Amino acid sequence: MKDLTTSEAAEALGVAPVTVRMWCRKGRFPNAYSEDTPRGVIWYIPKGDLNGVEPMKPGPKPKTAIGKTRPQK
């Protein structure tokens, strides 16, 4: 079974590659491994590590003061 690159894993999960790289650094994929290259670190994720992984849901939207303006000085 071929291991996936971060781009391939991102496409399979419907998230951005940068998100997959962050998850790799944080240990979300227990069998992921990295290789140092002249262009930087490349992560590889076994396909089995994607089973059961769901993208995190976005947090609550920040509250904004609608219709309020900043007081003039």
Image (cartoon, grey):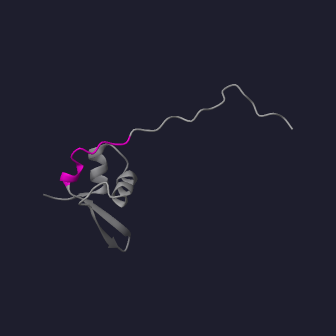
Name the residue furthest bottom: 38
Q: Main secondary structure of the magenta part?
A: loop
Q: Is residue 49 magenta?
A: yes
Q: Is residue 57 magenta?
A: no
Give whichever of 7, 73 is nearer the camera.
Answer: 73
Magenta range is 47-56
Which corner quadrant of the image does residue 58 belong to? top left
Which corner quadrant of the image does residue 14 belong to? top left
> Which quarter of the figure is the N terminus placed in?
bottom left
Q: Is residue 24 left or right of residue 71?
A: left
Give whichever of 63, 39 is nearer the camera.
Answer: 63
Q: Taking 46 as reference, is 13 above or below it? A: above
Query: Where does residue 26 sit, x and y in percent of width and height?
Result: 37, 58
Query: Where does residue 53 sit, x and y in percent of width and height?
Result: 27, 45
Which corner quadrant of the image does residue 40 belong to? bottom left
Q: Residue at x 63, y 32 (%)?
A: 64
Q: Residue at x 40, y 54 (%)?
A: 18
Q: Residue at x 23, y 60 (%)?
A: 31
Name the residue furthest right: 73
Query: Where does residue 71 sit, x and y in percent of width and height?
Result: 81, 33
Name the residue furthest top: 67
Q: Taking 2 as reference, is 50 above or below it? A: above
Query: Where does residue 54 sit, x and y in percent of width and height?
Result: 30, 42
Give whichever of 42, 26 is nearer the camera.
Answer: 26
Q: How many numbered discs?
A: 0
Q: Is residue 13 left or right of residue 69?
A: left
Q: Taking 37 as reference, is 71 above or below it? A: above
Give whichever of 17, 72 is nearer the camera.
Answer: 72
